[in-house]
Image: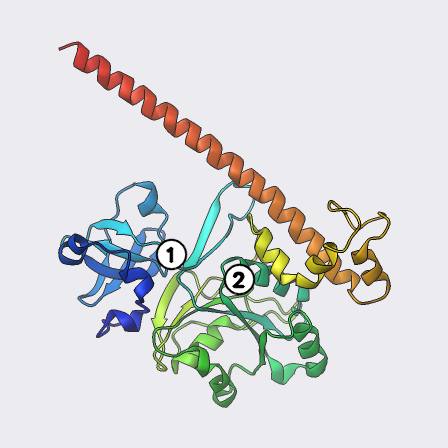
Amino acid sequence: MNSLSSLVQLGWRPFFQQQLTLDELTEFTIGRVIEQHRSGVVVLSELGQFNLSQSYSEDAERLCVGDWVLFNGDNQFHRRLERQSLFQRKAPGSKVATQLISSNVDSVFIVCSLNQDFNLSLIERYLSLTKEAQVEPVIILTKADLCDDLEQKLQQVQSLDPFMMVHAINALDQEQLSALDTYCKQGNTIALLGSSGVGKSTVVNGLMGFEAQLTSAIRDDDSKGRHTTTSRALKTLPQGGLILDTPGMRELQLGACEQGVSETFSEITDLARQCRFANCSHDNEPACAVRVAIETGVISTRRFVSYQKLMREQALNGATLAEKRAKDKALGKMINSVQNESRSRKKGSF
């Protein structure tokens, strides 16, 4: 990614400008994190591209692609600006931590393949994450040329949200890809989310106009793909926008995102308010509006099970993460207290 002529091309907006003091405007350089690696981050500014020197402060360690930062003439990190949006998930496996994915995103392409990997429940999981971040979701269904029941699957996806934008494309067909140009205008940042092998890198290559990402064939036995993107990076699009490809996520655990799940399943949330009991579990309680909707076919059993699963998961993981934050905060206070007491003793000995 080359140096750009203005911060506006990088997505700079009044929201970020208003966070700066006059001193910061004169003393520091504004840049955006465009690459994230295990060894650190790369920042792009009007002066060019730099590897950012980070201290081991908590804020510096928590930078992610899309962040706006201030740094000095020695390329040393000063501070991160408040984010307009943030994508995060619970870290994979049993680790109790939150993993940041990207920030300051305008639209998210949720990419799903129309082969045997097609999964409505997985799309709902990505939608919950996207709506929690208050970002516009756009569903991209790839491999449309290989799908025998395209209209049926399109209807299934659109039924998740009648107002949601859904595109079924062959990502190798440039004419079909042009339908996505409207999201790629100057200053807009797009993130791609999806499992390995669904065609995210092919979409990126098509929008970029050249092979910016490596692609690999899917396995014939189960239609699963292999990781082709190994790090997160922002790239400039010919249309003027910015696009972020993320490594495929074999595991996407939700953290605390009750609002995102509620919005994704808004029809269930609305019906739940009509139940006789405020704490209705929608199991065997009398006058349960949700159960009636399931029995009459208004809501499918699959969708209700997906809703319950995501609600339980986010509540459990959210509580676990909150407990860890509380313990970390208490530990930090104890360490500061010990350090302050030690300094006081040293001063008293002189």
**Label at residue 130:** 2
Residue furthest out toward the bottom: 175
> Which residue lies at the image location 67% right of the left edge and 47% below the top edge?
312
Camera sees residue 331: yes
Task: Report the quarter where the N terminus lies.
Answer: bottom left
> Which residue lies at the image location 59% right of the left edge and 77% below the top edge?
166
* Number of numbered tags placed on the structure image: 2
Q: Is residue 151 above or below residue 113?
A: below
Say which quarter of the image contains residue 27: bottom left
**Side of 268 where 315 appears, left or right:** left
Q: Position of residue 208 (x, y in %)?
A: 39, 79
Q: Nearer the viewer, residue 273 or 316?
A: 273
Q: Position of residue 174 (x, y in %)?
A: 47, 87
Q: Amino acid under label 2?
A: Thr
Q: Is residue 310 above or below residue 130?
A: above
Numbered disc 2: secondary structure: helix
Residue under label 1, please give it: 83
Q: Position of residue 270 (x, y in %)?
A: 70, 60
In space, the residues marked 1 and 2 are separated at their CA atoms by: 15 Å
Contact between labelled residues 2 and 1, with CB atoms less than 8 Å apart = no
**Side of 2 where 315 appears, left or right:** right
> Which residue lies at the image location 57% right of the left edge and 62% below the top edge?
126
The way the protein has been coloured in the rendering is rainbow
Residue density around tag 1, few if under 14, some if 14–19, many if 20 or more, within 10 Å:
some
